[in-house]
Image (spheres, rainbow, N blue to C red):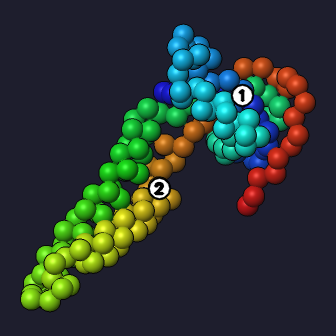
């Protein structure tokens, strides 16, 4: 289980809107002063003026507005989701580009279109779009999607600091 600390900034029934607490993995790293990732993340946070977007999670422990909580997501779900998000669209993009090139060379033998570059580009765009549509469909409709969503594991502390309530859309 991958775990992160967050603060509850909104509530609605069994769901809560949480925002990660300030700080990151870079804070505990000995190389933070010489690492480009930490410097870039800090610079972007200062430039954009925000720490990150709130995330809607399940709230089975009954956390209340302002509570510091521990949010977790199963490691396997994160790995499967990453593989699905990256591999499926890229795989479909390559397969459709190859299929379109072969189809163009078979249908338009002897013409400029038979070289395959325009067909490959069109096939790649169609494959990439189909891959992203498949990922979207899979993440919304899959019975395993609920298992992969983050959940509040426990309340760490109650109502530390001021919190401005954030409404959760329907």
Q: Residue 98 appears at what percent x and percent y?
A: 19, 68
Image vertical order of residue 140 relative to residue 152, above or below: below
Q: Residue at x 79, y 28 (%)?
A: 67
Which quadrant holds residue 128? bottom left
Between 67 and 133, the residue placed more toward the observer is 133
Mark 2 or 1: in front is 1
Q: Residue 7 appears at what percent x and percent y?
A: 75, 31
Q: Which residue is mark 1?
A: 21
Decide if residue 148 is in sight here: yes
Between 58 and 18, the residue placed more toward the observer is 18
Decide if residue 130 is in sight here: no
Q: Residue at x 88, y 25 (%)?
A: 161
Q: Which residue is mark 2?
A: 139
Is residue 137 toward the left or the right of residue 71 in the image? left
**Element on which disc 2 rests:** helix
Q: Residue 78 appears at what percent x and percent y?
A: 44, 38
Marks 2 and 1 close (CB-CB < 8 Å): no
Q: Residue 88 appears at what percent x and percent y?
A: 33, 56
Is residue 81 toward the left or the right of residue 164 in the image? left
Image vertical order of residue 162 relative to residue 136, above or below: above
Image vertical order of residue 31 relative to residue 60, above or below: above
Question: For the residues marked 2 and 1, what is the alpha-carbon distance in whole angstroms?
Answer: 26 Å
Between 96 and 122, the residue placed more toward the observer is 122
Image vertical order of residue 112 relative to residue 14, above or below: below
> Which mark, residue 79?
none
**Element on which disc 1 rests:** loop
Q: Residue at x 36, y 70 (%)?
A: 125
Is residue 2 toward the left or the right of residue 91 in the image? right
Which quadrant of the figure contains the C terminus? Answer: bottom right
Is residue 25 toward the left or the right of residue 125 in the image? right
Circle 2 Cα neighbour tier, 10 Å, few/some/many (<14 / 14–19 / ≥20): some
């Amino acid at each position: 289980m991958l775990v992160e600390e967050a603060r509850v900034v909104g509530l609605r029934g069994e769901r809560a809107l949480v925002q990660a607490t300030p700080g990151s993995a870079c804070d505990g790293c000995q190389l933070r002063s010489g690492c480009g990732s930490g410097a870039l993340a800090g610079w972007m946070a200062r430039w954009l003026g925000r720490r990150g977007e709130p995330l809607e999670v399940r709230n089975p422990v009954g956390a209340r507005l302002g509570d510091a909580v521990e949010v977790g997501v199963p490691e396997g779900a994160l790995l499967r989701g990453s593989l699905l998000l990256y591999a499926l669209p890229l795989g479909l993009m390559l397969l459709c580009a190859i299929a379109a090139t072969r189809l163009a060379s078979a249908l338009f033998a002897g013409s400029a279109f038979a070289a395959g570059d325009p067909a490959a580009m069109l096939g790649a765009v169609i494959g990439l779009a189909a891959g992203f549509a498949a990922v979207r469909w899979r993440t919304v409709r899959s019975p395993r999607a609920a298992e992969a969503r983050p959940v509040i594991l426990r309340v760490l502390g109650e109502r530390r600091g001021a919190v401005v309530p954030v409404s959760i859309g329907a």
